[in-house]
Image (cartoon, rainbow, N blue to C red):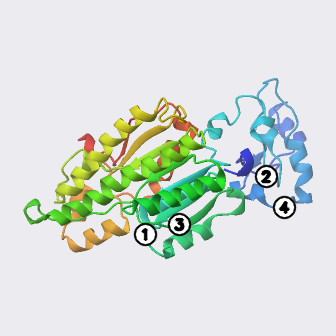
Amino acid sequence: MAQGGYLPQHFPIHCEQRTSRAEKRSLKGSSPVRREFHSAPRSLYRQPNPANQHAIASATQQTSKDPRPRASQVISEGHLIKPESIQPGVNKTFNRFDMAGTATIVTGGSQGLGLAMAEGLAEAGSKVYCIDRGDQPSQHFKVASERLLPYDGGQLHYRQADITDTKALDNAIADIAAEHQRLDGVIAAAGIMKVSPALEYDVEDARKMLDVNFTGVLMTATSAARQMMKYKTQGSICLVASMSGLIANKGLISPVYNASKAAVIQLARSLSMEWGRGGGEEGVNGIRVNCLSPGHIVTPMVRKNLEEIPGVRETWESENMMGRISEPEEFKGAGLFLLSKASSFMTGNNLVIDGGHTAW
């Protein structure tokens, strides 16, 4: 998606007339010429090529009484098509996913699942701020930033803050909102895992897990909601839970982690009820809160478990209906859906994307 409400039209621009009009008529009477277009979508953003102008002009001629524009009628080489300049009904669905002009935040956004979803938001046009505890962004973050192209319209920025440091987290979120005079969405993706039998947990182990996975998520959501209310933004908050909050995973002994994710799922329901119709004296109606519960993903955190626990990968792969473990990039669309207008009537729900693991 591009900045300023402009959307790329994925129609190819190289026109190849396979059969001349005269030849076609001699073969099949008076049937119209078929033209085929071959091009990758990104070629639309190249500089105009004079050699293609005649082909484009021919392709855009009106040939139907249908009031809706045909694909060939909206070709404009080297330019973006403004949605409102096209007849009603065209690309309205894509517009729902457009994040141009928005400011969003992803905690735990330096790598793994958080970074993948942040990249998806930026590709849709949002100015995305990844908050993580490292003094410097990871190499994964730098690579993702370089992948963004100018016509994507969005940007990736990095802010250092530990979500267990409530004051630092509040300041970071407030500064971002003040810079843009708005806050449109937050994905709370920061989390930790400890694989250990319950009998081997001590108080500090449990407290650390809950401080990050539950309290940190709660503080992220409340801090974001305060800014949405302050700037009267109808924002959306996505809390990243896990299918582990719904089931006990075979081959993975992590009771406190599972419990923390179950708490996050219930937290989303409670916050959506509290903020859906406004909250606070200066509140704004319609702050949505939902959960995303992924199945097993090959993130840096999970990869360590796969290496340390013999046979766990095979177990996980055999336990879902697709026979494999997911990749972080497969959740880009889910994050974008939950923060965009595409999910405008969805709140208090838990979106489970687990390859069918919990559907057995």
Identify the mark nearer the N-term, 4 or 1. 4
Q: Residues within 10 Å of mark 4 (few under 14, many from 20)?
A: few
In front: 227, or 50?
Answer: 227
Residue 47: assigned label = 4
Where is residue 146? Give x, y as percent. Answer: 62, 70
Amino acid type, label 2: Ile
User: In the figure, is residue 36 to the left or right of 267?
Assistant: right
Query: What secondary structure is found at the residue carrying circle 4?
Result: loop
Residue assigned mark 2: 13
Q: Nearer the viewer, mark 1 or mark 2?
A: 1
Q: Secondary structure at mark 2?
A: loop
- Please report the residue visible at 79 percent of the width from the left and 52 percent of the height from the top: 13
Residue 150 in sight from this viewpoint: yes
In the image, what residue type sits under mark 4? Gln
Horizontal side, residue 262 vs residue 225: left or right: left
Q: Which residue is mark 1?
A: 133
Decide if residue 6 is in sight here.
Answer: no
Cα distance, mark 2 to mark 4?
A: 12 Å
Marker disc for residue 159: 3
226 or 158: nearer the viewer = 226
Q: Quadrant of residue 257?
A: bottom left
Q: Position of residue 360 (x, y in %)?
A: 23, 41
* Numbered disc in front, either 2 or 3: 3
Q: Please say if the residues under marks 2 and 4 sit with CB atoms less than 8 Å apart.
A: no
